[in-house]
Image (spheres, rainbow, N blue to C red):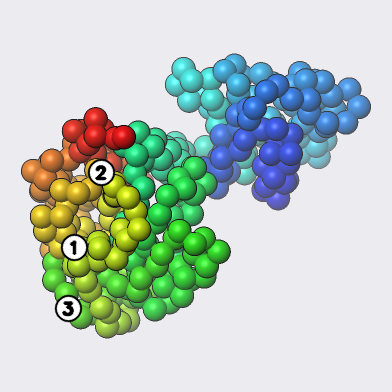
Amino acid sequence: MQTAYRRLLKLMPRLGLQVTDLGPGTAVVSRRGRRVRIPLGPGADVLARDNGRYTVADAGEDTWVVRRRKTRAQREEGGREATTVRLGDSGARLLLDPTAGNDERKLQLAAAEYLCPQHVAGMLELYGVNCVFDVGANKGQYARRLRRFGYTGRIVSFEPTSEHFAKLEKAAADDPDWWVYQYGLGREDTTSTIHVGWNTMNSLLPPSEYGKDRYLRFTKSDTEEIQIRRLDSMMEKALDGIDEPRPFLKMDTQGYDLEVFAGGGDRVAEFVGLQSEVAVLRLYEGSPPMTEAIGVYEAGGFGITGMYPVTREANTGRVIEFDCVMMRADAASEKG
């Protein structure tokens, strides 16, 4: 069933529909351009009928629900059809694969994973951002997501670890305005040791007791020596050739974001916005609590425009970390 669901998602763009995959078993389906005719086979009409394989229903506001019908065998086995969930009053719907289950926490996190980059893309456009500093780039997931959501300006990604930098460099190879550097960013130019082998959670900080209880990956790790540079020392090179730079700072450094921010010195005032992963429940020793981190950013002139949960405790529902998006309000009026 999962394979059929993936095939359905791939089919939709050919039918003039825009599909955004939110994660396992979850997607948003909406109209792209004018009303289209869907060639599903004999008897198919303009988003109205079905041919026994798919059902297409108008959900309002340029959005439709597309569902694959169950086979006879699936009906006999009691299998479920794909279901949908309304997203507020916008008319948009989530298309849910029945094999993905109905875990509300997973649905919320999948929706947040979609909504956060959507929100960031809107802020980048509103504030006229022309250079994104992608600090803690890992394999380039954030930059690729920005491109999918329509950002066309420069991206400068920083990833210090050898394994992930190799993948980042490959991901950026065909994008001339996506620059990559094998550095970590911090409070001073130095070398340091980072914990590796934790996939997307590699950190310069050791895990907290809470972190060890939550993630088995923290029970052992290797280390790697990395180069660290101050943010302000990299800005001249990163912004070279951009007339009237309007940079945005994204940080995802597993508890080290305030160190990155401190390395910007007085030049943090040049950033029109930032995104930081802030911790409610700390996974790393020495990482700042959410209130401290947000307080520092607010003191720097940034105000919150959105907060999106990154991870939750399954047994309590408590949020562990948020992606916090903040903008310098007075910079909106400075846009040309």
- Quadrant of the rendered image containing residue 263: bottom left
The amino acid beneath tag 1 is Asp
The amino acid beneath tag 2 is Gly
Mark earlier in primary sequence (2, 1): 1
- Whether 282 is drawn above or below 10: the answer is below
Label 3: which residue? 190
**C-alpha span from label 3 to label 1:** 14 Å
Label 2: which residue? 273
Residue 275 seen from this side: no
Q: Percent position (x, y) of residue 156?
A: 36, 60
Q: Are marks 3 and 1 in contact (CB under 8 Å)?
A: no
- Quadrant of the rendered image containing residue 228: bottom left
Q: Percent position (x, y) of residue 141?
A: 45, 57
Q: 38 or 108, which lies in front? A: 38
- Whether 2 is drawn above or below 97: the answer is below
Tag nearer the camera, 3 or 1? 1
